[in-house]
Structures are given as structure tokens and as C-alpha cells.
Image (cartoon, rainbow, N blue to C red):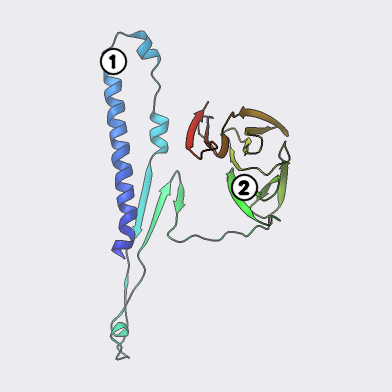
Amino acid sequence: MKAKHLAVLKKEEDELKKITLDVQQSICDLKTMLDSNNVSFISAHKSRNAEFKKLSSKVSISLPTFSPKMIISENISEMFGSLSALSTTEEHHNKVVLDEPKLITAIQTGYDELFSVTCYGEDEIWTRGRNRIMKLYNLQGILLKSVQTKSGFIPHDMSVTSAGDLVYADQDERTVNIVENKMIHETIRLKGWLPTNIFSTSCGDLLVAMYDESLELSVTLVP
């Protein structure tokens, strides 16, 4: 049981060490800024306090308890009692990651094949499948919205921006598109490359993975 949960603790330790180094570097930068007369350097400084607050995490461990019982069997494994399971939970941004996943609901999307889902807020998810239509469901399985790709082709990937807008990659058109107020706008058109995956960063940029005809992979951050 200890070996099973050791990886979680090691991961937490590594994350805390990285956070500590980032904080120490930030303190050094602040000390340098205080001693500097460079106005441009001072005006360009951006506080990372909000970022460090988001990086806080907490791991709690529930140690096993021993439950003794009367000796009523010659089976050694049942002779003295039993240990309960050792459980570990990780808490990030007030969210708890459980050892075992908990099924909340099952949603029937209507796709022959469901390719991927992406979260929209706390209780809604966008889905895409072998279909040109992307669908937004709540956790009760109710269809809230559907969007058809501008080209009519199947979306290759999708994500949700920090502003809550849906973005999707259209590999057939070599484009990345954003859905704003029920209108679809082309934001990126690639030349010689095909978009494969897309991810929206917290600052609003789009991380696009793509490949060319020779299958050489590339990742580009697009502001």
C-alpha cells in the first residue's frame, strides 16, 4: 500500500520544490528591482502573487486502521483481523482528486464514435465525435447547444478559451476557428501544415499542434 501511494507523494514533493524555486527566484528579481534605477525594468515588472496562490496544493493521507476480530478460523489471513485500505487525496484549487474515479452521470451524445470532451465551466461539457456537429451538454445529460463546423467537415480537435468561447481545428480546411456569439470566425489558416490538436492557455493564447505532409510534428504558440 505504501508503494502504491509513494508516486503521489513524490509528485507532490517535486511540485512543491519547483514552486519554492520559483518563489525564491521571484524574491531575487524583486530585490534586484529595488536596487535598480532602470525605469523600464521596473515598469515592466509583473507580480506573480496571483500565480503562486493558484499553485498551492495539498495532499492528505488517510492511514489504514486495524480491525481485530475473534479467532474463529484456521486461515492465517483471517486469524487476527484486517487492515482497511490506505487512501490518498490530492487537492488543487479546492478540487479533490480521488484515488478511484466516481461516476457522476452517463450522457448519451448520439455520436457513433465519441472522440473527445472538454469542460465548459463547472457543470457543462462540449463533445465531438464522427460528426460535423459539436454539442454542449450539462451534467444532467440535457443538450444545451450545438454548433456545426463552418466547412461542414468533422472537427479534428476543440478547446474552450478563458473567455468561454469554443475553438476547434478544421484539418480539411487547415484552419483554427472560434465560435463567438453563435458566429464562427477563422482565426488561423495554415499553409503546408495540418492542425491536429488545440489547447487554449489561461492568458488567451492558442497552443496548436500540427504536422506537414512528411509527418514532422510541430507545436506552435499563437497569441
User: Label 1 amino acid?
Assistant: Leu
The residue lying toward the viewer, choosing from 213 and 58, is 213
Point 62% across, 47% down: residue: 125
The relative height of residue 34 versus residue 6 in the rendered view (above or below) is above
Q: Is residue 106 left or right of residue 94?
A: right
The relative height of residue 81 versus residue 157 in the rendered view (above or below) is below
Point 26% across, 13% down: residue: 35
Label whose residue precedes the other's in the sequence (2 or 1):
1
Mark 1, secondary structure of its residue: helix
User: Label 2 amino acid?
Assistant: Ile
Q: Mark 2 points at which residue?
A: 125
- Residue 111: where, in percent of width, then height? 69, 55
Q: Residues within 10 Å of mark 2 (few under 14, many from 20)?
A: some
The residue lying toward the viewer, choosing from 48 and 200, is 200
Q: Residue 34 carries which label?
A: 1
Q: Is residue 211 left or right of residue 75?
A: right
- Which picture quadrant has residue 187? top right
Mark 2, secondary structure of its residue: strand
Q: Is residue 180 left or right of residue 194?
A: right
The residue lying toward the viewer, choosing from 147 and 115, is 115
- Residue 84: where, in percent of width, then height? 36, 71
Q: How crowded is mark 1: few (under 14 residues within 10 Å), some or many (20 or more)?
A: few
